[in-house]
Image: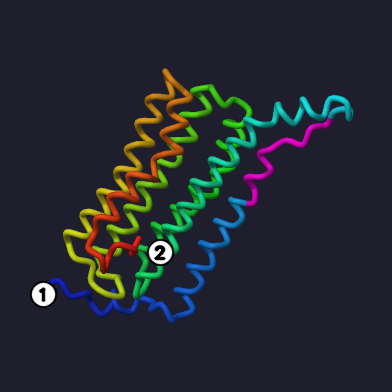
């Protein structure tokens, strides 16, 4: 970092180290939003209100809702895991990171709504496209968090530019696969769902090709 690249005293004053109350509050808020969103997902599954002799068929009719719940839970859980790994590598937070994180959490909190719609209409493009689009935006939001952390050098230890580029490429690939799923949902809904299920595999493969010391950063 050159003298001209060095942060100003005002910028330094807005940085909060990982041992500070502000850092802890941001992490706790993030975990709380994820926990609430993941818990609310179960409310997207209806409890059958039918006579006992019709219960078995009613439970079978709930399978699409259970499938939507399971998919959404897995996708949100993967976002939480990635967020946890990111914050393990941060030396501090600052206003830019906090704002991006808050916007990102706002999108996480929306997940139960499109999940409920998808459970009710699992093969409808009008349900599937918004569901997948929401996770595309979440993927892009996570990339924005990484980019901001790199821009302000917020890491506990420096992240080399080649590794940073590989990391961005990996998560951009995941978002791109979901975006393809949005397009595919207009013609082959089941294939779009399959892409959503498998989208994390290429991300893991690309990240695994990072140098050994950075392979488990994200």
Left-right relation of 25 to 146? right
Q: Quadrant of residue 163?
A: bottom left
Percent coordinates x, y for residue 159 in the rendering: 23, 67
Query: Residue 42 in magenta?
Result: yes
In this view, the residue in front, 169 or 22, is 169
Question: Along the polypeptide, which appears first: circle 2 or circle 1?
Answer: 1
In percent of the image, x 46 and y 38: which residue is there?
197
Residue at far top of view = 187
Q: Could you say whether the residue bearing mark 1 is in a helix, strand or loop?
A: loop
Left-right relation of 171 to 6? right
In percent of the image, x 57 and y 37: which residue is there?
115
In percent of the image, x 49 and y 35: which residue is there?
131
In percent of the image, x 33 and y 64: which residue is there?
217
Percent coordinates x, y for residue 46 in the rendering: 73, 35
Q: Tell me the CA gap for discs 2 and 1.
A: 29 Å
Quickly name the residue at label 2. Answer: 85
Percent coordinates x, y for residue 138 in the rendering: 42, 47
Percent coordinates x, y for residue 59 in the rendering: 74, 31
In this view, the residue in front, 157 or 19, is 157
Quickly name the residue at label 1. Answer: 2
Q: Quadrant of residue 184?
A: top left
Q: How is the image coloured?
A: rainbow
Q: Quadrant of residue 183?
A: top left
Vertical relation: 130 (above or below) 8: above
Q: Dot 2: few (<14), some (14–19), or many (≥20) neighbours within 10 Å?
A: some
Left-right relation of 2 to 55? left
| On-image quarter of the N terminus | bottom left
Query: Residue 52 in magenta?
Result: no
Q: Which residues are magenta?
A: 39-49
| On-image quarter of the C terminus | bottom left
């Amino acid at each position: 970092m050159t003298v001209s690249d060095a942060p100003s005293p005002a910028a330094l004053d807005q940085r909060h180290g990982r041992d500070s109350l502000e850092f802890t509050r941001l992490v706790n808020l993030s975990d709380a939003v994820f926990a609430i969103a993941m818990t609310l997902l179960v409310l997207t599954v209806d409890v059958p209100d039918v006579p006992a002799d019709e219960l078995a068929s009613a439970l079978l009719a709930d399978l699409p809702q259970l499938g939507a719940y399971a998919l959404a839970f897995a996708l949100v859980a993967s976002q939480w895991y990635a967020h946890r790994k990111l914050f393990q590598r941060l030396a501090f937070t600052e206003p830019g990171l906090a704002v991006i994180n808050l916007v990102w959490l706002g999108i996480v909190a929306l997940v139960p709504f499109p999940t409920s719609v998808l459970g009710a209409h699992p093969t409808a493009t009008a349900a599937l496209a918004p569901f997948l689009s929401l996770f595309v935006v979440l993927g892009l939001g996570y990339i924005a968090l990484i980019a901001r952390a790199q821009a302000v050098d917020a890491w506990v230890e420096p992240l080399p530019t080649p590794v940073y580029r590989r990391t961005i490429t990996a998560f951009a690939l995941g978002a791109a696969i979901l975006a393809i799923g949005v397009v595919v949902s207009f013609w082959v809904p089941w294939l779009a769902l399959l892409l959503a299920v498998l989208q994390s595999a290429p991300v893991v493969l690309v990240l695994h090709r990072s140098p050994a010391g950075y392979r488990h950063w994200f």
